[in-house]
Amino acid sequence: MPIHLPVEDTGPPTVAIRKLCVNRGGRPILSDLSCDIPRGKITAIVGLNGCGKSTLLRTLVGEFRYTGTIQFACGEDHSKPRPDHVGYVPQRLSIEASLPITVRDLLGLTLQRWPIFFGVSSRVIRKMTPMLDRVGVPPRLLDVPIDGLSGGQLQRVMLALALEPKPELLLLDEPSAGIDFKDQESFNSLLAEINDQSGTTIILVSHDLNTLSRFADRVLCLRNGRIISEGKPAEVLTPESIAKTFGPVLAAV
Ligand SMILES: Nc1ncnc2c1ncn2[C@@H]1O[C@H](COP(=O)(O)OP(=O)(O)OP(=O)(O)O)[C@@H](O)[C@H]1O
C-alpha cells in the first residue's frame, strides 16, 4: 500500500495526475499512478534506474500517449499546457553533440519562430545576454560550440531556454547528472531562487537523496512505475521508505 502524506494547502495543485498508465515498447512503464504536484513547491522524483522517472516527465510534456488523466492548472485553459507554461530540461540533448552549433545558434534556433536561414532576428539577439545572465552563464559562451561546454554550463543554457518566456511549471530530468559537487550546489541554489522569486512549480528527477532532503519540499518515490510513498523529505526519506524504493542494500548503508 503506497504511503501518501498530506500536501499542505497551497491551493489547487499545478498538476493533478489520476490513474496514469503509460506503455512503452508494448510494456507497462507507469501503472495506475495518482498524485498532486503542489503549486509553487519543489517536488523531487526519486527511484532506481528504469523505474519510470523520465517517462513521467516526458508524459507531462506530451511526448507519450497515456490513459488516465493529467489535469494542469497552468494558464487559462486548464485542460492542456501550452509550451510557454511548461519549461523542460531533458536528461540529455537529443542532437548530435559534434554538430558545429554554438550556444548563440542553439538559442536562436529555439527562440525564433521562422527558419534559421533567414538569420537570427535582432529581437532574439537582444534577449540572449539577459537570458544567460539570469542563470549565471557569461555572455562570452555565446560563441562556444555546445560540445565545448562543461556539463554544468550546458545544464544552465538548457535551463535558460526552459525559463523562456516564464513557465508556471518547470520540469528537470536529473539536472545534476555529470556535474561536480560545487556546481550541483550552485545549480540547486539557482533553482531554489527561481522557485522563491517567481513561485514557479518545479518537478525534478534526482538521485541525490542528501541534497533533496534539504532542498525539496516534497519527494515522490517511484518503484516499477508505481508510487511507493510521497510526502515531505523528512517524512518520506526514512529507512523503511528508502528500502521499499531502492531495496534493502541502500537502506542499510
Ligand atoms: N524506447 C523505449 N521503448 C521501450 N521501453 C523503453 C524505451 N525507453 C525506455 N524504456 C524503458 O522504460 C523504462 C523506464 O525508463 P525511464 O527512462 O523512464 O526510467 P528512469 O527511471 O528515468 O531511469 P534512469 O534513472 O536510468 O534515467 C525502462 O525500463 C526502460 O528500459
Image (cartoon, rainbow, N blue to C red):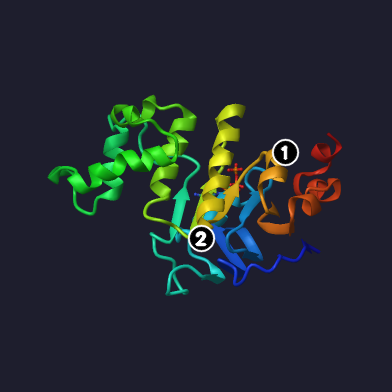
Query: According to the image, label 1 marks what residue?
Result: 210
What separation in Å lies between label 1 and label 2 (alpha carbons)?
Answer: 26 Å
Query: What element does badge 2 sit on?
Result: helix
Q: Amino acid at mark 1?
A: Asn
Q: Position of residue 154 (x, y in %)?
A: 43, 34
Closest to the observer, 202 or 189 = 189
Q: Which dot, 1 or 2, sits closer to the camera? A: 1
Q: Position of residue 206 (x, y in %)?
A: 62, 43
Please, which residue is most extreme toward the front here? 197
Residue located at (68% from left, 69% from top): 9
Above or below — where is 118 with respect to 177? below
Q: Does residue 176 appear to the left or right of 252 in the view shown?
A: left
Binning the other alpha carbons within 10 Å of mark 1 as few (below 14), some (14 to 19) or many (20 upward) gives: few
Closest to the observer, 184 or 21 = 184
Above or below — where is 195 with respect to 117? below
Query: What element does badge 1 sit on?
Result: helix
Which mark, by number, is residue 118? none
Residue 25, can we see it? no
Closest to the observer, 245 or 200 = 200
Respond yes or no on whether mark 2 lies under 8 Å from ligand 1: no
Name the quarter where the C terminus is drawn. Answer: top right
Respond yes or no on whether mark 1 lies under 8 Å from ligand 1: no
Above or below — where is 125 with respect to 67? above
Query: According to the image, label 2 marks what residue?
Result: 60
Residue located at (41% from left, 33% from top): 137
